[in-house]
Image: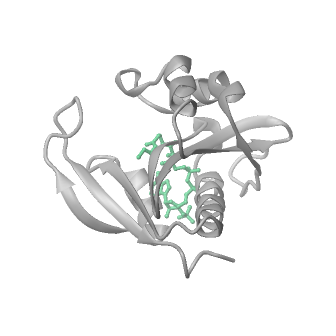
Amino acid sequence: MTEGKSLYPVIEEVGSAFSAVLAALQGAAFAPSARWQEKAFSELFATPGVTALLGSIDGTPVGFVLARSVADEAEILTLAVSPSCQRRGVARALMEKLMTLLAERETERLFLEVSVNNCPARALYTACGFTCAGTRKRYYEDGSDAEVMVREISSSSGK
Ligand SMILES: CC(C)(COP(=O)(O)OP(=O)(O)OC[C@H]1O[C@@H](n2cnc3c(N)ncnc32)[C@H](O)[C@@H]1OP(=O)(O)O)[C@@H](O)C(=O)NCCC(=O)NCCS
């Protein structure tokens, strides 16, 4: 992979068989206290409404997004991009694909929670059209607040 250039991942929807792949990607991107084990992913896949999109470059997994839908609303549960591939458009590509897919599935609003201290993720979500819908005080284990963000998706992203 060439340093600094935009990446155009192949994005596919994956299921429980990819739990270990998602756990490895998540483990590389998040601090140890925020990492999820493979079991946590496989347990999530056993619940209804879960969508996981995996992005790969030349067959190598580089990032994923995991969301859960209930009726006409969905929530992003986690999102991660390999540190060596960050800031090259992978997360944006995953988010755009997720919003297109959810729009096809008649989802109207997509929510997420992000730490107020997570500047890269907040910048990403703002760039993807999310706006602040509120805060949850001391939501994370480190005591930081969460910003709740939302984006209407049905009309604008259903390409
Ligand atoms: C947040 C994260 C998923 C972003 O992934 P990414 O592939 O690097 O993001 P992209 O390259 O697609 O960035 C798209 C836009 O988001 C914003 N952005 C992303 N990373 C940024 C950073 N470090 N600083 C400032 N803005 C950033 C920019 O607006 C960027 O567009 P630009 O590069 O044209 O300016 C990645 O940093 C990551 O995995 N972080 C650790 C895990 C995490 O925090 N996940 C989110 C939990 S809510």
Tell me residue 92's x, y (percent).
59, 59
Of 35 and 123, the residue lying toward us: 35
Residue at image x 16%, y 34%? 143
- Image-based side of 141 in relation to 62, left or right: left
- Give the farthest residue toward the bottom: 155
Q: Quadrant of residue 30?
A: top left
Tell me residue 70's x, y (percent).
45, 53
Residue at image x 35%, y 22%? 33
Where 124 sits versus 115, above or below?
below
- Image-based side of 23 in relation to 138, left or right: right
- Image-based side of 140 in relation to 46, left or right: left
Where 94 sits versus 104, above or below?
above
Tell me residue 53's x, y (percent).
66, 46
Task: Name the image quarter holding the C terminus.
Answer: bottom right
Tell me residue 51's x, y (percent).
60, 46
- Give the farthest residue toward the left: 137
